[in-house]
Structure formats: C-alpha cells, structure tokens
Image (cartoon, grey):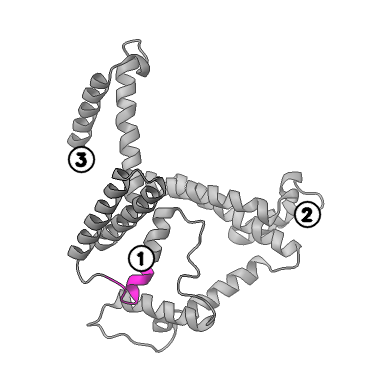
Amino acid sequence: MSQSKGGISRLRDVVATLRGPDGCPWDREQTLQSMAGYLVEETYEVLDAIGSNDPIALREELGDLLFNVCLTAQIAADQGMFTLDDAADAVSQKLVRRHPHVFGDEVFDEDIDIAGTIHRRWDEIKRAERPERRFFDGIPQALPALLRARRITDRAARIGFEWPNIEGVWAKIREEDQELQQAIANNEPNEMQHEYGDVLFAWVNLGRFLGIDPEDALQATNRRFMSRFSYVEAAITSTGRTLEESTLEEMDALWNEAKQKSKQKR
C-alpha cells in the first residue's frame, strides 16, 4: 500500500488491505448484509454530529461513514459485482443527466418557481430512465416514518396533489383529529392506530407547508425534554432522594423552572 496516497485513494487502499489475505479477520468476515446495520448506525452518528454543530465531530463521523461505504463497495468488488469507482462513475453520470440546466442547454424562466421546476424535471428524467418505476418507487421503506411521510408528501405535492393553501391542511388536521377521538370513544384499537397515523401524517403536511422538517422538529423536542428532565433529576438527587421518591407536583414545579431557564437563554 502506497504511503504517498491521500484522501479517497488512500482509504480505498487501506480497505482493500483490511479485506486482503493478510488483513483483519473482522473486516474479512463482513458481508453486504452485515454492513447494512453499520451503514444505518454511522448515518445516525453523522446526523448527531450535524445537530451538535461540532465540525471536528462531523469530520470524524463522515470519515466513519465513508469507511463503511468503501468497505461495502470492496465487498461488492470481491464478489465481482462492481468497484467503488464504478459506483462513483454511475452517480456522476446520473447527476449530469438529471441536471440539464447545469450540464446541458436547458434554461429556466427566472419568473417561475425554479426550485419546484428543478424537482419536477428531476422526477421526469428519473421516470424516463426507468419507465417501469411506479410513482413512489425510490423512497426507501427503511426511512424513519416521519421522514418517509415527508418524502411521500413532497413527491405528491410536486405533481399538483396538494392543498391550495394552509387552511386546507388545518381542516384536514381537524378532520383526522375528530376521527381519532371517535375511534377512542368507540374503544376500537385497530381504528385508533389507523386514525392516529392519519393525524401524524396530516401534521407532517403542515410542517411541509411551514418549511419545518418533522424529524428535525421532533428530535429538537426530544433533546429539550431530556435536558429539562435532567434538570429535574439533578435537583431531586441533590437532596439525597431518587426520582421515585419525589412527588409529581415537585417534579412538575422543577420542570417549569427548567423551562423558564431555557427560555431565558434563547
């Protein structure tokens, strides 16, 4: 392995050595199937680093994700399927093909919704590449449900399956909320789950209208909840008691105190 190489070339050589005859037993025993979980885990660690606004952590986590991508490609190469360069060439060709306004002579009118038009053209070109694809093909089933709902509604909206204004979204939320309340009143578990999902889906649409990503918003709420509850926990344990030994009223008062402190920091 050449020590003079850097960047992607060096990483590719390192991975090839790890997978080689005298390489690491762990790396050698990995399969495409075993790599799936690692790719998901590393992707979430990248998202955590982005959320922390820590460039050093982000660089490290992107490197870990890149290693897993290279290792997966090396496994495919070992099986005679394709190489990392093949994958890079394929995505480069696809990006050029799907951006005729950048790499071709297609021009957009400045008075139109350029971003929306680009999305629609992307979908048109994508469908032309594989006419057998159905409308929602390509949205991974393994995506977190909120993110997948956002992708589904985005795609439907781009071809005009959309409310004309936000009032229509609010009306849909109220409609779904009433149906959920009715299912609860009727004590119908299957209907409750069904209607609860519809309510969540309607709220995802509202977030899209407001330019809010539901996954990001809920993750931020998760962090706020945990931070405030940690304040409650610290306050109670500082008195020598456990959370279980405190009262709901005490925890609620501390929660509100933590909430006020967090507002003052904004």
Magenta-colored segment: predominant secondary structure: helix
Determine whether label 2 and label 3 are within 8 Å by CB: no
**Residue at image coords 54%, 78%:** 93
Q: Residue at x 52, y 82 (%)?
A: 131
Is residue 12 or residue 111 the one in the foreground? 111
Q: Which residues are magenta?
A: 153-162
Residue at point 81% right, 49% down?
22
Q: Residue at x 66, y 61 (%)?
A: 73
| Residue ID for mark 1 | 153
Amino acid of disc 2:
Gly
Badge 1 amino acid: Thr
Compared across the picture, whether 159 is left or right of 18 comes to left
View extreme (top): residue:
240
Camera sees residue 153: yes
Cα distance, mark 2 to mark 3?
Answer: 53 Å
Residue ID for mark 3 = 266
Residue marked by disc 2: 20
Q: CA distance from mark 2 to mark 1?
A: 45 Å
Q: Residues within 10 Å of mark 3 (few under 14, many from 20)?
A: few
Task: Determine whether 17 is above or below 25 in the image.
Answer: below
Label 1 Cα neighbours within 10 Å, binned few <14 / some 14-19 / many ≥20: some
Q: Could you give the CA–CA distance between mark 3 and mark 1, rounded to whole angstroms?
A: 32 Å
